[in-house]
Image (cartoon, grey):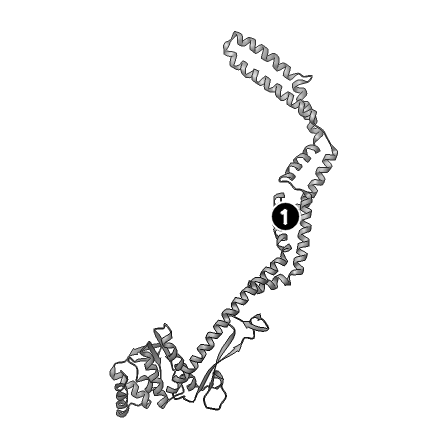
Amino acid sequence: MGLEEQLSHLKDNDRENVQRLDLIEYQLEEIKEAKLKQQEDEELTAEQYKLANMEKLFSQMQLAYEALYGDEKGLELVREAMVALQESASIDQSLEEINDSLTNNFYMLEEVTFQIRDHVEQLDYDPNRLDFISNRLDEINHLKRKYGSTIEEVLLYAERITKEAEELSNLDEKIESVEKDLHTHKAQALSLAQSLSKSRKHAAKQLKEAIEMELKDLFMEKTSFTVQFQPHRRGIIVEKGEEVFTLNEEGLERMEFYLSSNPGEPEKSLSKVASGGEISRIMLALKSILTDRSERTALIFDEVDTGVSGRVAGAIGEKIYAISNESQVLCITHLPQVASLANTHMYIKKRETNNRVSTEVEELNDDQRIDELARMLSGSEITTNTKETAREMLSSKKA
């Protein structure tokens, strides 16, 4: 998203952002007031189960204590067995290991009995606590239904919307920052565009002079050629002082070639007033000018001589020949004046076989070159005179 689109988005969504901030603040307050702790719901669920079964827990713990230390005196019976085994071990030393084992287990059972007694004494059923846990779990589950399936997810959600709230709270600063960046980029773009425009207009004057010079060689000496600049109608608007500019990827303006073929006639768009022959010569003039300024090693002229004949055709041929001294040239032509200046001739023909058309290209030898040039001069029939003329045209080609 560009800076201008980003700024528009920020401003257009200002009302939505305010509403979103209100919602986030409400959600954060709701989560904050709950004071959630990790795994709190699991601990409360376990405690709730314990309180709900407190009567059963108390009776079973009491039963265990009575069995060991109550009227049944299970622990006392183990003590008597321990004393008896100690006396037996003093007589039979092989009983010492069994005696030690029983002694250790007695003291272990005694410790367990005391722990059971202490736990029973600490058991306290508080119905208010059970109600508190039930309400607290309802509160936690309510938050989990809204913000996450676990307490951890709820807390992570709170962290995420806290960051979003900070961004929304600083929206005015964000807009100001984007506006500043946009102004800087527009100023830089305008500076570059103005520099480009200056260079273009300077080059346009040079191009005008060069093309008109080339057109004189092509018998269009009365032709006036200019490059006109028109401001863009659509693009980025940039203000500088009281001036307003429209920029796009092409710069400040679009360019169009204008032409006047005769003195006194107003210049009009090349695409509207030029004939096929004039456009061919102008294109040739352009390529002739640009040949020494490009890195191209080959140029293709596809019927650039369309709409011309006679001496104009000869001038076009000589111009193409001059270009060939700087670059490799491939020229497709139907004019003998142009074809006769080539160093190599290729004959192109189409052949239909089994309802499929194929194109064949054949390099011509000296005799074939004369025949084809003679055919271009006379039409379908080759005569002695046309062959002689073709031979003369080839021999008079510039070296």
Residue furthest to the right in view is 128
Q: Residue at x 62, y 20 (%)?
A: 111
Q: Quadrant of the C terminus?
A: bottom left
**Residue 222 placement, left or right of 130:** left
Considering depth in this image, is 341 or 379 the residue closer to the camera?
Answer: 341
Residue 354 makes an appearance in the image: no
Residue 335: % across, % down:
35, 86
Q: Residue drawn 25% across and 81% down?
A: 365
Q: Is residue 43 visible?
A: yes
Q: What residue type is labelled 1?
A: Ala
Tell me: residue 174, above or below residue 354.
Answer: above
Give residue 235's quadrant in the image.
bottom right
Query: Residue 42, how many percent across, how many down?
Result: 64, 38
Residue with the most extreme bottom position:
385
Give the residue displayed 63% in from the left and 58% down from the top: 172
169 lies left or right of 207? right
Q: Position of residue 198 (x, y in %)?
A: 48, 75
- The x and y percentages for residue 38 are 62, 40
Q: What element carries label 1?
A: helix
**Above-or-below relation of 225 to 84:** below
Quarter occupied by residue 239: bottom right
Disc 1 target residue: 158
Q: Is residue 214 left or right of residue 94?
A: left
